[in-house]
Image: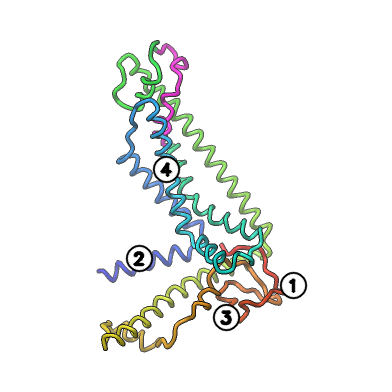
Amino acid sequence: MAALIAENFKFLSLFFKSKDVMIFNGLVALGTVCSQELFSVVAFHCPCSPARNYLYGLAAIGVPALALFVIGVILNNHTWNFVAEFRKRGAKNCTTPAIFLLFGSIIGRAVVAPITWSVISLLRGEAYVCALSEFLKPEALTNFPPNYGAETMARFPCKDIPVEVLSFKEEVIRRLKYESQLLGWIVIGTVAIGLFLSKCLQRCCSPLGHLQEEYWSQYRSVETRLFSRTAELHAKVLAAANVKRFFGFVALDNEEKDLIKEFPVEDVQSSLQWNEITGVYLYRENKGVPLYSRLHKWAKGLMGNSMDFEGKEMALLAV
């Protein structure tokens, strides 16, 4: 059973690594929607008090969105590739357009969950109603009783409303939800237009044809998957050899024994080799021949070689 669960997790991991970015972003958005629904049911409780309502409502929308954005940046491989590039090579090989594209890629992926959270919060309207109920002017409501101010308006999202104004609750909630949902749809439209324009800009500025871009995307996916699987096996074989050297034996199952016999490890890669294949990668050509990754460039023995005119790098980020 444990082996089956482990295999399923491996499949999911490979799925996320190999599928299109849009599919992954869609799944991130779906997970965010589910989290938002759970938060609304379990954790959202408007304080129904002037000043506190506004802070609580904004925090309910903004703080989770900010946390999701930070998590998105942390989990993005481009973030740490750029850190490695800057630390090892000072980003001297990155042009200004390349750095712009890199940050655009990092931020673009990181904002999927925060935008989804904010939009769902606005469409639901609960946080917005809580935050802005105290600012709704009583004079805007027809036949609203006098002598009721912000303190009373702040209690409309809750149940303990004075009987004299209880009949206005539905109208107050409806007005605020209208504003909230309108803002949510505006955000959705703005994001959709932004995505369309950015996709058009990417296609127009790309030095590659559509088919070569698709091939490059497939190559990166396959290389990442094979590199990860091979690194895991290499680490297992090396660890088994070191444990056996220490204890005199190593506890392995039959499948692991066969793998170790089939793929013996005699040496480890130097730090220089790891550094050469780590970092930001731009699309490059050497004498007209494409180089699809840092590993591809390293395998061709071109690391450290200056690019001539025919082999100049192009400001197209491997996203």
Q: Which residue is mark 3?
A: 299
| Residue 172 point in image, percent of width and height | 41, 23
Asked if residue 142 is among those painted magenta in the image, a careful observer would answer yes
The part of the image, by quadrant, that contains residue 6 is: bottom left
Q: Which residue is mark 1?
A: 309
Q: Earlier in the sequence, mark 4 or mark 1?
A: 4
Amino acid at circle 4: Val
C-alpha gap between disc 4 and disc 1: 49 Å
Q: Earlier in the sequence, mark 3 or mark 4?
A: 4
Circle 3 residues within 10 Å: few <14, some 14–19, many ≥20: few
Quadrant occupied by the N terminus: bottom left
Range covered by the magenta-colored residues? 124-144
C-alpha gap between disc 1 and disc 2: 46 Å
C-alpha gap between disc 1 and disc 3: 21 Å
Name the element at disc 2. helix
Q: Earlier in the sequence, mark 1 or mark 3?
A: 3
Q: Identify which residue is drawn at 35% across, 80% down.
A: 239
Q: Earlier in the sequence, mark 2 or mark 4?
A: 2
Q: Which residue is mark 2?
A: 9
Name the element at disc 4. helix
Circle 1 residues within 10 Å: few <14, some 14–19, many ≥20: few
Q: Which residue is mark 4?
A: 63
Answer whether labels 3 and 2 touch (C-beta < 8 Å).
no
| Residue 98 point in image, percent of width and height | 63, 60
Give the prevailing secondary structure in the magenta stretch: helix
